[in-house]
Amino acid sequence: DTAVSQTPKYLVTQMGNDKSIKCEQNLGHDTMYWYKQDSKKFLKIMFSYNNKELIINETVPNRFSPKSPDKAHLNLHINSLELGDSAVYFCASSQDSGGYGYTFGSGTRLTVV
Amino acid sequence: QKEVEQDPGPLSVPEGAIVSLNCTYSNSAFQYFMWYRQYSRKGPELLMYTYSSGNKEDGRFTAQVDKSSKYISLFIRDSQPSDSATYLCAMLIQGAQKLVFGQGTRLTINP
């Protein structure tokens, strides 16, 4: 039973397209996150939501729009994809502010061509 | 300067060796310290977490935090080929809801 699941695992798309990534957690956690991992493996936070409310928006271009329909789901929609958006996107969740750690999904590998 | 610095390696050691992985940080407000392991094409998985300074041991793994030096370490004893992965340190300010990661160190244990 996967704790944090993301779909799709792989996404190859052309520049200028719009795409969405979905995330669901069954851990009962209050907070969910999107992280971006670049080619050098550096993981950087993009957004965090606590109980459907946006808490952190880390200077991400407004082409990226997160949506949380309920506290178990956090989706990421990306408009007008650019080559530089190619990366692995990870969803994660935590209880409260995450002092006991985050649980990550297995990632969505996005390639923009 | 990045908030959390970690040597990306790669680090290659023989099976059975003791491995030492380290991170330094600049923000003295960090209170929670974690180590994640990430296998190729997988998500990071939490290995250990500690709060404030001190040592914590779990099987072959020991995490150390020295807040006065702003330095954290992860030691792996009796390393196994299955320990080959990227190890990421991560830190959190209480209430901030933003885990800050080091770049990760790629470790290979050779049989």
Image: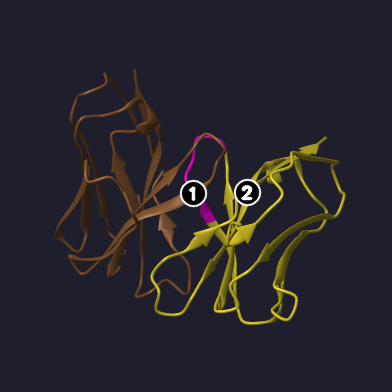
Chain colours: A brown, B yellow
Q: Is residue A78 toward the left or the right of residue B82 in the image?
A: left
Is residue A40 left or right of A58 when viewed as pictured? Answer: right
Q: Which residue occupies 30% across, 61% down? A: A32
Near mark 2 (Cα within 10 A), the count class, few <14, some 14-19 or many ≥20, is many
| Mark 2 element type | loop
**The one of B42 and A37 positioned closer to us in this rendering:** A37
- Quadrant showing the C terminus of chain B: top right
Quarter of the picture containing the N terminus of chain B is: bottom right
Q: Look at the picture and state if B79 lies above or below B34.
A: above
Vertical side of A51 occupied by A16: above or below: above
Residue topped by disc 1:
A43
Where, by quadrant of the figure, is residue B74 drawn?
A: bottom right
Label 2, on which residue? B104
Q: Label 1 sits on what residue type?
A: Leu
Mark 1 Cα shell of 10 Å, populated few (<14), some (14-19), many (≥20): many
Which chain hosts label 1? A
Residue A101 drawn at (x, y percent): 47, 67
Which segment did they paint magenta?
Answer: B40-45
Q: Is B111 positioned to the left or the right of A63 in the image?
A: right
A83 over A63 or under it: above or below:
above
Q: Are marks 1 and 2 in contact (CB under 8 Å)?
A: yes
Relative to A17, residue A35 above or below: below
Q: Find residue A71 and name its label.
A: none
- What residue is shown at x 45% (from left), y 80% (from top)? B94
| Left or right: where A87 falls relative to A14 | right
Residue B54 at x, y = what percent? 71, 81
| Residue ID at (60%, 49%) | B103
Q: How many marks?
A: 2
**Chain under callout 2:** B
